[in-house]
Amino acid sequence: MAGAGYYNTTYTIGNREGLTDTVADLFADDVPFFAAAEKIPATHPKHEWQTDVLPSAVTTGIIEGADITYAVNAARVRKYNYTQIRLRNWAISFTQLSVNVAGIKDQVGREMMKSMKALLTDYDKRFLSSGIGTPGATVTKARLAYGIQKAIQTNTGRGSSAGGAVPQALTESKVNSLLQKIWGQGGDPRALYCGAYQKRVISTNFTAKTGFSFRIEASARMAIANINKYEGSFGTLDIIPDRQAKPTDIVIVTPDHVKVAVLRDIEQYKGAPSASSVKGWVEAEMTLQYGNEKAHGKQTHLKTASVAGV
């Protein structure tokens, strides 16, 4: 035994490996923006809806007995978005399916599950983005859906001055200014989506906090530095961190206007047997119906570092 008078792990070749029958999954699969949106049917790759607004309020009176002159209200406006196809595929060799795998009972089912989770994160990211929609007019160009940040044109704010290169910190004043713009247009802002850093800025530096108690027992040794709701001058916002949000931006929405229009729901497919493997994929086709863009707002070009207290 090469110098050893007893069996030990260095010289013994029959020991089994110490691989446990567990897998430590780290799936960042929550999709808050996508999950919160009402799901509605789509019937065409170009999905359309209408928007309408009230005329401005007036304070003038009418003369008794006056003849009526008829006014025409503003016409409804037709809006659209394109359905976007996404798929996630996988392949497992026949040999791999035949071996004993630790912690996995169904390799095909697991790959299918991971693909479905990944597909939802794809849509969450696209719908929350500033991506521009395209009709996919050629066989080499895919249809793409407008993201809500691209749709928002009226209620906007920049962390830096127009054309400026230096981003600024997100502040309570900026959020309230954006809320005022949305409210002034007739919106009912109730949800703010942001990335991890902007969530920390809000939790650390905003003063109007709701949703938790300041009376904390000293013996509990508990410190709370979190805001899940923010009550401003124009209502209470849910502060929702989304891993797919752009780090430099926040988006505030009127939830009733945000819907996901589904042309083809998520389906599982089996690939053709073209090689010594099992293949498959999941695929869907859907788009974002953002309602009236004036019901939402965005703040862009924000700092992602070196904000006081964060």
Image (cartoon, rainbow, N blue to C red):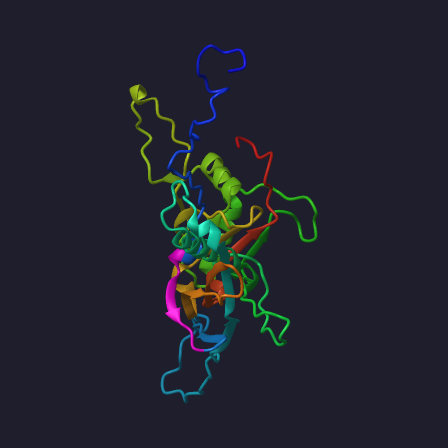
Q: Give the percent coordinates (x, y) of residue 273.
A: 49, 66
Q: Give the percent coordinates (x, y) of residue 114.
A: 44, 52
| Residue 200 to residue 184: above or below | above
Task: Tell which of 54 and 142 is nearer to you.
Answer: 142
Task: Tell which of 240 and 13 is nearer to you.
Answer: 13
* Outermost residue toward the front in this view: 1
Q: Is residue 11 magenta?
A: no
> Based on the displayed image, in which of its 4 quarters is residue 113 positioned?
bottom left
* Residue at 53% over, 47% down: 174
- Could you tell me how many numbered marks the image carries? 0
* Residue at 62% over, 42% down: 168
* Outermost residue toward the bottom in this view: 67
Say whether residue 192 is visible: no
Q: Give the percent coordinates (x, y) of residue 266.
A: 41, 64
| Residue 26 to residue 4: above or below | below
Q: Is residue 156 left or right of residue 278?
A: right
Task: Tell which of 82 and 254 is nearer to you.
Answer: 82
Q: Is residue 197 left or right of residue 22?
A: right
> Based on the displayed image, in which of its 4 quarters is residue 52 positioned?
bottom left
| Residue 216 to residue 198: above or below | above
Task: Report the span colored magenta.
Answer: 35-43
Task: Tell which of 74 and 12 is nearer to you.
Answer: 12
Q: Give the percent coordinates (x, y) of residue 143.
A: 57, 70
Q: Is residue 233 left or right of residue 136?
A: left
Q: Is residue 36 magenta?
A: yes
